[in-house]
């Protein structure tokens, strides 16, 4: 398999092994570079005669682009074992209104949240200056648990995650977006997520999961993993029943960011 496919498969497999993607939970997509496309077409072969299928969204900003995407109803645990059935490569037409399957997705189609992924790619393509290419949705249990016991506010979640583990502010110095519970795969959820992605690279879906973006598989997965580990530490401290005697101060968070040349979101820090 081409290296880019191997990277996508590894991210999916690691998510399953860490318990982030039970059953058919979660999905992922990657916006390919032209080099990725050329290598994959050479090594895998593309069905350039494939028919077009209308999208339920209009994504003119992505016209002609190619994506690796998980299949509808697929299990992350099977991506490594049944790759050509569990993922595929699709192309968006010149109008940004339809897609065709060039490879993979045997007897299937892209994830039911493909439209939401594409809209999110549009937002992050602009917000990141064309850097972000990965979208990954997962179900991290500690972070989900937090949505039951803390206010669903960006500042609240951002500060709790930052203050629970030193490395957290390194991966999300801009903070976390939080969206109230909405029907999975709905236009409302896609719209609210996109509004948050204009400012953040990670969005919490209350009682549901996490949606992260990144420039690479390692970048996106590392962000998700760090957020969940920080949430796990916080929930363990909370469940101990003990009074919190100390945590990472605001000044300490600023010092971490200053040392790494990062800019912490002061609006959230003071919120």
Image (spheres, grey):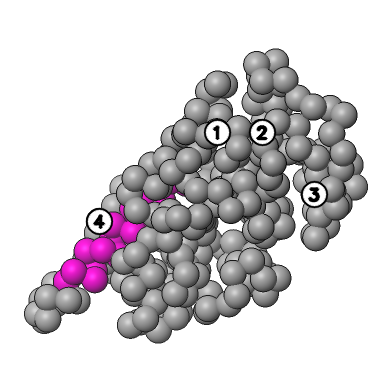
Task: Quote the CA–CA distance across marks 1 and 4.
Answer: 37 Å
Tell me the magenta residue range.
220-237
- Distance between mark 2 and mark 3 Cα atoms: 24 Å
Q: Which comes before the other along the chain, label 3 or label 1?
A: 3
Residue 98: image location, x then y, percent: 84, 48
Residue at the (69%, 41%) spot, across then down: 107
In the image, which is nearer the foreground, mark 3 or mark 1? 1
Do the CB atoms of the residues marked 2 and 1 lie less than 8 Å apart?
Answer: yes
Label 3 residue SS: helix
Q: Nearer the viewer, mark 1 or mark 4?
A: 1
Q: Which residue is mark 1?
A: 83
Nearer to us: label 3 or label 4: 3
Please report the residue visible at 65 percent of the width from the left and 16 percent of the height from the top: 43
CA separation in Å, label 4 and label 2 = 41 Å
From mark 3 to mark 4, how far is it between C-alphas?
37 Å
- State the CA–CA distance, disc 2 to disc 1: 8 Å
Main secondary structure along the magenta-highlighted residues:
helix
The residue tagged with tag 4: helix, strand or loop? loop
Q: Which residue in the protein does label 4 denote?
A: 166
């Amino acid at each position: 398999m081409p290296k880019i496919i191997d990277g996508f498969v590894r991210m999916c497999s690691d998510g399953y092994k860490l318990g982030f993607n039970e059953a058919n939970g979660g999905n992922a997509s990657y916006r390919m570079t032209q080099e990725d496309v050329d290598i994959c077409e050479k090594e895998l072969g593309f069905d350039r005669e494939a028919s077009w299928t209308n999208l339920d969204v209009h994504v003119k900003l992505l016209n002609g682009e190619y994506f690796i995407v998980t299949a509808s109803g697929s299990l992350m645990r099977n991506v490594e074992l049944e790759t050509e059935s569990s993922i595929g490569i699709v192309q968006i037409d010149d109008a940004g209104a339809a897609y065709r399957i060039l490879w993979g997705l045997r007897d299937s189609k892209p994830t039911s949240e493909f439209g939401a992924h594409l809209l999110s790619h549009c937002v992050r393509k602009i917000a990141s200056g064309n850097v972000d290419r990965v979208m990954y949705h997962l179900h991290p249990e500690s972070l989900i648990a937090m949505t039951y016991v803390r206010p669903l506010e960006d500042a609240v979640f951002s500060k709790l995650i930052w203050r629970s583990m030193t490395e957290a502010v390194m991966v999300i110095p801009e903070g976390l977006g939080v969206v109230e519970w909405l029907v999975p795969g709905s236009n409302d959820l896609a719209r609210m997520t996109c509004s948050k992605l204009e400012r953040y690279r990670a969005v919490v879906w209350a009682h549901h999961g996490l949606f992260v973006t990144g420039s690479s598989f390692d970048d996106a997965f590392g962000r998700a993993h760090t957020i969940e580990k920080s949430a796990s530490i916080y929930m363990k401290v909370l469940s101990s029943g003990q009074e919190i005697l100390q945590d990472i101060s605001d000044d300490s968070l600023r010092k971490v960011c200053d040392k790494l040349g990062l800019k912490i979101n002061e609006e959230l820090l003071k919120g």
